[in-house]
Each structure stands twice: as C-alpha cells, then as structure tokens.
C-alpha cells in the first residue's frame, strides 16, 4: 500500500451504503404507510398527497443518486457499463425528484398553503435545478456527443466536486425536510418520532459513506 493512502478500498464502504439504502427505504415506507395513512396522487385526504413528496425525494431521488455516484466503485464491470449505470440512475433520480416536488406543490395548492417560504424549499429547489444542469453537462460532455479529450479532462475534477456538493445539498434538504415535518406534526417523544429521527441519522450516515467512496480507490493496492 502506498504511503499516505487511506489503506482501505471503497468496496466495503459501498456494501455498508447498500445496507443503509435498504434500512432507510424500509423506515420511510413504514413511516408513510403505517403512521401517516399512506400515499395518493388524488385524494380528499391532502396529507396522502404530501406523503408522495418524502417518499420520492428520499427513496426515489437521494438514495438512487448516491447509488449512481458509487457505481464506479460498486459495479465490477467495464468503465462504459459503469458510466451507463451512473447516468441512468442519475436520470431516474432526477425524474423522481421532479415528480416529488410537483407532488408537494400540488399538496400546497390544494390545501391552500403558500409556496417556497422556507429554507428547506429554497435549498431544495436549488438542488434539483443544479442536479438537472449537472446531468445535462455530464451527459453532453462524457456520453453524447462527448467533448474533446482535453476539455473532458479539464471538466472532470469539477464534475466530481460539484456532483458531490449537489449530493450533499440534497442530503441537507432531506434533513431539514424531516425536521420541518417533525415540528409541523408536533411529534414530541413518540414511536413515530424515533422512526423519523432514525431515518435522518441513517441518511446522514449514507451521505458520509457515499462521500467516502468518492475519495477511496477501487482497490487498496
Ligand atoms: C432532497 C430531497 C428534497 C427536496 C429537493 C425537497 C424540495 C422541496 C421543495 C422545493 C419544497 C417547496 C414546495 C412548495 O413550496 O410548494 C418542499 C416542501 C416541503 N418539503 Fe421537501 N424536499 C426534499 C425532501 C423532503 C423530506 C425528506 C421531507 C420530510 C418529510 C420534506 C418535507 C417537506 C415539507 C413539510 C414541505 C412543505 C413546507 C415547505 O415548503 O418547506 N421534504 N420540499
Ligand atoms: C446530476 C447528475 C450527476 C452527478 C451528481 C454526478 C456525480 C459524479 C461524481 C460524484 C463522480 C465521482 C465518482 C467517483 O469518482 O467515485 C462522478 C464521476 C463521473 N461521472 Fe458523473 N454525475 C452526474 C451525471 C453524469 C452523467 C450524465 C454522466 C455521463 C456519462 C457522468 C459521467 C461521469 C464520469 C465519466 C465520471 C468519472 C468516473 C471515473 O473516471 O472515476 N456523470 N460523477
């Protein structure tokens, strides 16, 4: 092992992160289906429309985006295959993110609540816009029609840095969203409060793990 290296490979960290994906998805589903009355796109019970928002933002957007970033470390295949998985998972995340934000706007409009009045909504809207731009720039530079080699090499470190920044912005947004909902519901000390708070803790662990895989090498030679 080279002196000054991290001494570990990214692989065990990606496995830990996959387990967190399962745990967070389970917690979110239990929360929304068991404690919050379920999900709907059309309903007299407007809370069910709201519930689509956290589901799509966490299980549809944040977790797939993290998996997409880890694809270069977690998928034992050729670079082209990893790249395809990276771009497709990011696309799925983007699509879910847009529908998830549409759902909360729909909820606000039908429940006659004003839009975009919180820090959560501002960072969230910035995140999804930057995510869309990052995806387009990545697609046109690295997939089709592809930039020249020199341009690609100059853009790559910025793609990685800004990609990580946008992913952490998504994490911050999810955390603030959970806190906001906790307070709106006045959860206090309850079983449901534990579920919401553990979801937030595991999301934080997931984000740290994904960040770690970006700096770690594929194998620890
Ligand atoms: C990365 C993930 C997320 C993004 C990008 C995001 C984005 C947004 C945006 C843009 C709004 C404003 C909608 C409007 O004004 O009509 C909003 C509202 C809201 N979101 Fe999220 N959200 C995310 C995750 C979550 C999570 C996990 C929760 C937890 C329950 C949540 C709870 C809320 C609540 C309660 C509102 C309504 C109050 C407000 O506008 O702040 N969000 N979100
Ligand atoms: C919002 C969407 C995107 C985000 C947040 C993002 C983020 C990232 C991050 C954090 C890395 C570093 C991964 C690592 O080294 O472990 C990365 C690498 C990379 N991404 Fe993206 N990316 C996005 C979209 C795209 C798209 C659409 C393409 C098109 C093919 C692409 C192509 C690449 C390539 C070629 C690498 C370099 C992998 C390597 O050589 O190690 N990205 N991306």
Image (spheres, rainbow, N blue to C red):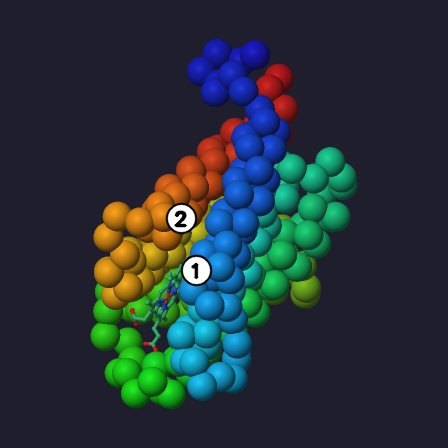
Residue under label 2: 195
Instruction: Determine the image quadrant of residue 4.
Output: top left
Q: Is residue 28 above or below residue 119?
A: above
Q: Is residue 180 visible?
A: no
Crowding near the residue tagged with mark 1, few <14, some 14–19, many ≥20 C-alpha atoms within 10 Å: few
In the picture provided, is 166 more to the left or to the right than 116?
A: right
Task: Say which element carries label 2.
Answer: helix
Q: Position of residue 79 (x, y in %)?
A: 71, 43
Task: Say which element carries label 1.
Answer: helix
Instruction: Determine the image quadrant of residue 108.
Output: bottom left
Q: Is residue 41 visible?
A: yes
Which badge, 1 or 2, comes first in the chain's sequence? 1
Dot 2 beta carbon under 8 Å from ligand 1: no
Is there a contact, CB below 8 Å, between mark 1 and mark 2?
Answer: yes
Q: Position of residue 48 (x, y in %)?
A: 46, 74
Q: In which quadrant of this rendering is ligand 1 seen? A: bottom left
Residue under label 1: 35
Q: Quadrant of the C terminus?
A: top right
Q: Residue at x 51, y 62 (%)?
A: 33
Could you say which disc has been placed on residue 194 in the image?
A: none
* Near-viewer residue (92 or 190): 190
Q: Is residue 111 above or below residue 59?
A: below
Could you tell me how far apart the alpha carbons at marks 1 and 2 are, in whole angstroms?
10 Å
Q: Residue at x 62, y 56 (%)?
A: 89
């Amino acid at each position: 092992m080279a002196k000054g290296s991290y001494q570990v490979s990214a692989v065990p960290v990606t496995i830990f992160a996959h387990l967190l994906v399962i745990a967070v998805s389970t917690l979110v589903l239990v929360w929304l289906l068991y404690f919050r009355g379920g999900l709907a796109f059309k309903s007299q019970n407007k809370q069910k429309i709201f519930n689509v928002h956290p589901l799509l933002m966490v299980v549809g957007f944040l977790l797939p985006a993290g998996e997409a970033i880890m694809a270069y470390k977690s998928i034992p295949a050729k670079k082209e295959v990893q790249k395809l998985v990276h771009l497709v998972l990011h696309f799925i995340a983007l699509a879910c993110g847009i529908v998830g934000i549409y759902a909360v706007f729909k909820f606000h409009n039908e429940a006659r609540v004003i839009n975009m009045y919180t820090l959560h909504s501002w960072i969230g809207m910035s995140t999804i816009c930057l995510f869309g731009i990052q995806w387009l720039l990545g697609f046109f530079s690295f997939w089709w029609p592809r930039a020249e080699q020199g341009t690609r090499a100059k853009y790559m470190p910025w793609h990685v840095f800004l990609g990580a920044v946008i992913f952490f912005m998504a994490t911050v947004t999810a955390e603030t969203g959970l806190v906001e909902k906790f307070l709106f519901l006045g959860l206090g000390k309850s079983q449901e409060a534990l579920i919401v708070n553990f979801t937030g803790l595991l999301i934080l662990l997931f984000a740290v793990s994904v960040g770690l895989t970006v700096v770690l090498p594929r194998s620890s030679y």
